[in-house]
Amino acid sequence: MERRIGVIGIVVEDREQAAARLNQILSEHADIIVGRMGIPYREKNLAVISLIIDGTTDEIGALTGKIGNLKGVKVKSALVTRG
């Protein structure tokens, strides 16, 4: 299966409720995460996380699907074919 490299952007609107489960999901998918950066946006009571990922579309879809099902969390991805 073709692998892709990309960026996943995550906005956490409810840090107290979502943080533990989000970190668990990210740990479960650590094999496709190349890098991670998290920034608290205190003025808006949000957290913004960016992930650099390298995986198949199935692996990436599983990760973003689980994240997208968390209450108070928004997720978007941008992928390119690995060349």
Image (spheres, rainbow, N blue to C red):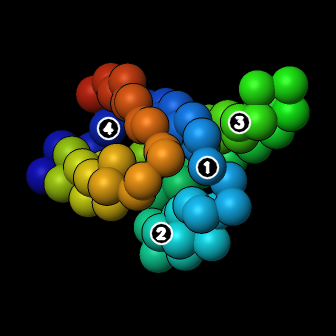
Q: Relative to 36, is 10 above or below?
A: above
Q: Relative to 61, is 10 above or below?
A: above
Mark earlier in primary sequence (2, 4): 4
Q: Image check: 8 left or right of 44? A: left
Which residue was labeled with disc 3? 46
Q: Amino acid at mark 4?
A: Arg
Residue 27 occupies quadrant:
bottom right
Residue 81 occupies quadrant:
top left
Q: Secondary structure at mark 4?
A: strand
Residue at (68, 53) in percent of width and height? 15
Q: Does residue 50 appear in the picture of this structure?
A: yes
Q: Amino acid at mark 2?
A: Ile
Instruction: Categorize mark 4 by other alpha carbons within 10 Å: few (<14), some (14-19), many (20+).
Output: some
Residue at (71, 36) in percent of width and height? 46
Which residue was labeled with disc 4? 4
Q: Nearer the viewer, residue 6 or 12?
A: 12
Q: Relative to 40, is 58 above or below?
A: below
Residue at (69, 61) in percent of width and height? 16
Which residue was labeled with disc 2? 25
Instruction: Categorize mark 2 by other alpha carbons within 10 Å: few (<14), some (14-19), many (20+).
Output: some
Q: Position of residue 19 (x, y in %)?
A: 64, 62
Mark earlier in primary sequence (1, 3): 1
